[in-house]
Amino acid sequence: MEPPIIIELLGEKFPGEVLASGESLGQSWVSLKRDRLADICKYLKTTPEIKMDYLIDVTAVDWLPRTPRFEVVYHMRSIKHGSSLRLKVPVEEDDPKVPTVTGVWLTANWHERETFDLMGIIFEGHPDPRRILMPDDWEGHPLRKDYPLGGYDWEFKPW
């Protein structure tokens, strides 16, 4: 099924959840409210005509100074049908949370941990919300636009 038709179906199946949609660089995208994200992803994966069975990645974009500041982005593909889709979920700086999709795609576990670690997006219901790249005592999220280019003051301690 072609992505524009999938987006149309999402609007019908989940009324009021689609904020916007379009195409960029040959790939269709849809912007969604965050509350029913896990349900929408489950629908995209389990509907035989759509079958988005491969979660390529989860990431986030910091649009500082724009409001909402962040956008969580999901790239997915149907191996069976050969179609791709990008989901975008806007989140506010003062409430940077989205539901986890680890119950839909197990690989989301690592992607969500990385997005938390580097951008500070909290994935509610995540089974293992630990840092994955930065040390446990690291302060801040280094891919945010307000993170100091040289990092915070710290002292190098060789082993």
Image: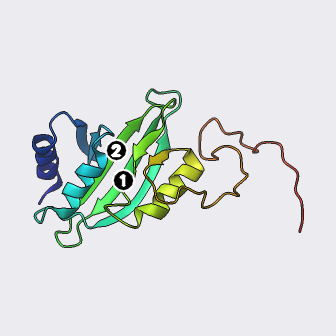
Numbered label attached to residue 90? none
* Dot 2 alpha-carbon crowd within 10 angstroms: few under 14, some 14 to 19, many 20 or more: many
- Of residues 67 and 25, which is closer to you in this image? 67
Check contact, mark 2 vs mark 1: CB within 8 A.
yes
Q: Is residue 154 above or below residue 128?
A: above
Q: Is residue 87 visible?
A: yes
Residue at mark 2: 88
- Viewed as shown, does residue 44 lie left or right of 146? left
* Distance of label 2 from label 1 (alpha carbons): 6 Å
The kind of residue tagged 1 is: Tyr
* Dot 1 alpha-carbon crowd within 10 angstroms: few under 14, some 14 to 19, many 20 or more: many
Which element type, helix, strand or loop, lies under badge 2? strand
Q: Quadrant of the N terminus?
A: bottom left
Give the mark nearer the N terminus: 2 vs 1: 1
Q: Residue at x 43, y 29 (%)?
A: 68
Q: Residue at x 31, y 39 (%)?
A: 35
Count of numbered circles on the image? 2
Say which quarter of the image contains residue 44. bottom left
x, y percent for residue 116: 54, 50
The kind of residue tagged 2 is: Lys
x, y percent for residue 11: 14, 41
Residue at mark 1: 74
Say which quarter of the image contains residue 13. top left
- Viewed as shown, does residue 86 lie left or right of 151? left
